Image (cartoon, rainbow, N blue to C red):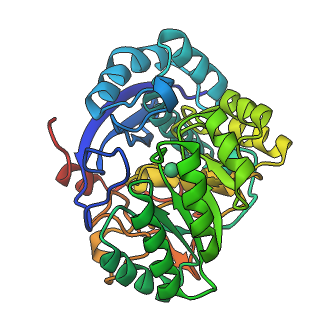
Amino acid sequence: MPVITTIETILIQLPTRREHKWTGLTEPIGRYVLVKMTDDAGRVGWGEAPALKDWGGEFGRYFGESPLITRTVIERYLAPAVLGVELGDAATLHARMDAVIKGYPYAKGAVDFAFYDLTGRWLGVPVHLLLGGRSRTRIPVTHSIGLIPIPQAVEEVAQVAAEGIRTIKIKVGVDPKRDVEMVRQIRAAVGPEVDLCVDANEGYRTPGEAIRTIRQMEEQRLIYAEQPVMGIERLAEVARAIDTPVMADESAWNAHDVVQIIEHRAAQIVSIYTTKPGGLLRAMEVAAVCRAAGIICNVNGSVETGIGNLANIQLAAAAPAVTLSCVVPVSTPAAQQRGQVGGIYYRDDLIAAPMTLEDGAILVPTGPGMGIEADLKKIETYRVSE
Ligand SMILES: [Mg+2]
């Protein structure tokens, strides 16, 4: 049985198409940690930690990870603990990581992705088959509108809708008046057919403020309101008062969080990440708990590069609970970009071929491992020292 023989970390910074911000974010996106894992036959698997120091859980329950913290945790603790683990044995991989250091799910997630990529390449199968099979072959994409001025947002959504994207997520949670007006103008720009959702990133100060604001936005037909306030109990208060389904994101990191959400009836929808629970093995556990409770899910993330985004796509393909459109980039290297905007957050990417977007959905790649090769030249181009 092949085993893990080396683990290396690489810090990269991808150039962004435009500034992308949300409530609470103070750092540029795209400065992330890659994990390069090799086995004793010289095969290589890739992972990524899209670590952000200011994206955490409610009331200090989970912490942000900066790229340098993630890198230290991987090099100092995780890598030595998992060397020698047999490919395919994800249970042992996670048991060893959890035994050597508590927490740090982003660091553990990056090691988990590289492990699944490597295992899939060894067996010659795509990662979604390792996760249980193919629930979907195409992943509809939600385009995310960050905290930008309303006229710029209106221009962008018109183009995105023309490109075939059917769901638009609007970052709100700054100022109720501005937020309601933003949603109204975006609805006017895209017409009645496109689905709209809002994400406040815990930005409303009280459940009352969230309830009053979302009730006004509901006139524009929202498919969900994501994390309007901080805290599972407060989320439940909002969920009881509005017609629009509430989605938990910051409140829902792992399977245990989802159990609490179910107990409080705090949300009808959960946003699953590959990173919040600490990798694909754990994300499938989150999805299983959601499914058992009748909670529906999307896959959402932190604007990963193509390497991390392939893990999103493999999860979305495998997990039966993931039935909603996903907030994932359409990872596309510079040479294949043709001026499109939908799902494009970076000017270049780290994968050797673009993801295929058809009728607003990414076609799940069926190649071995994560399905698309990493571009080693690009990784060198965007490598940074600190
Ligand atoms: Mg969110």
* Most foreground residue, 179 or 262: 179
Task: Kindly tell me whether residue 363 is visible in this rendering.
Answer: no
Instruction: Judge whether 117 appears above or below 86 on screen.
Output: below
Instruction: Judge whether 78 appears above or below 70 on screen.
Output: above
Q: Is residue 193 toward the left or the right of residue 136 in the image?
A: left
Horizontal and vertical percent position of residue 49? 40, 39
Quarter holding the C terminus is top left
* Residue drawn at (49%, 19%) of the image: 82
The residue at the far left in this view is: 385
* Most foreground residue, 74 or 257: 257
Quarter holding the N terminus is top right
The residue at the far top in this view is: 99
The part of the image, by quadrant, that contains residue 75 is top left
- Total marks placed: 0
* Residue drawn at (43%, 80%) of the image: 157
Horizontal and vertical percent position of residue 37? 41, 34
* Most foreground residue, 93 or 178: 178
* Residue drawn at (51%, 24%) of the image: 61
Instruction: Judge whether 47 appears above or below 170 on screen.
Output: above
* Most foreground residue, 330 or 112: 330
Instruction: Judge whether 303 appears above or below 157 on screen.
Output: above
Q: Is residue 129 toward the left or the right of residue 347 in the image?
A: right
Horizontal and vertical percent position of residue 25? 32, 46
Horizontal and vertical percent position of residue 347? 26, 67
The part of the image, by quadrant, that contains residue 153 is bottom left
Task: Kindly tell me whether residue 193 is visible in this rendering.
Answer: yes
